[in-house]
Amino acid sequence: MTASPDLRTPQLASPDLLRSVFRRHAAGVAVITANGPAGPVGFTATSLSSAAADPPLVSFGIGTGSSSWPVISDTEHVGIHILGEHQQDLAATFARSGADRFGSPTRWHEGPEGVPVLDDVLAWMVCRVVARVPAGDHRLVLGQVVVGDPAGVGRPLLYHQGRFTALRD
């Protein structure tokens, strides 16, 4: 077998390698919310995954340096919101450090278990946190779905190559 001339030399594992590889991985965009003693918190996540169907479980990652981590580390319930392609600004707001994430123009209401539920998303769920697993500088949070609504209208928002984008036909 002859090596192709465009093959590159593999890189050793590093945070930069991981980020570079995952820039090529298109991912759906979600916002995770919770209610804390000082009010609601939330952040944009592309690490959301279905973990099991029975019982219905989801997982997501959060950095322990995140401003939302102190609340997520202690809360019993979280909100999971699947964003539509029309919600790039909302995704950017929840991704931006120091932003007033729940101020205008963000539209939300208090949902089941007191969890902040964002309006006009493609789908949302409230989950009971069942585990927080250490994973380097992050934690993987496992949540059991309690209630949700999959009936939003539109197409999903994606994150690819370091920017928000949409599906193409």
Image: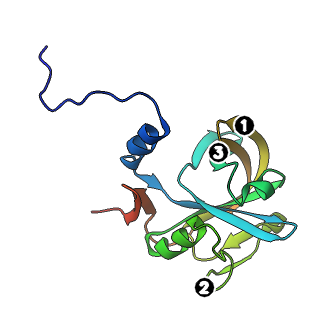
- Disc sitting over residue 105 in the figure: 2
Residue found at the far bottom of this picture? 104
For the residue pair 92 and 127, the one nearer the viewer reads as 92
Q: Earlier in the sequence, mark 3 or mark 1?
A: 3
Numbered disc 2: secondary structure = loop
Task: Work out whether 35 lies above or below 89.
Answer: above
Q: Earlier in the sequence, mark 2 or mark 3?
A: 3
The label number, if any, that marks residue 59 in the structure image? 3
Give the residue pinned by disc 1: 133
Question: Going 80% across and 66% down the picture, which residue do you hit?
Answer: 35
Expressed as whole percent of the image width and height from the top left, the position of residue 23 reads 39, 49
The type of residue carrying mark 3 is: Ser
Q: Which mark is residue 66?
A: none
Q: Is residue 72 left or right of residue 125?
A: right
> Which dot, 3 or 1, sits closer to the camera?
1
Residue 50 falls in image quadrant: top right
- Residue 140 x, y percent position in the rendering: 67, 42
Q: Position of residue 122 (x, y in %)?
A: 54, 67
Looking at the image, which residue sits at the far top? 1
Residue 16's quadrant in the figure?
top left
Q: Secondary structure at mark 1?
A: strand
Q: Give the total of numbered labels.
A: 3
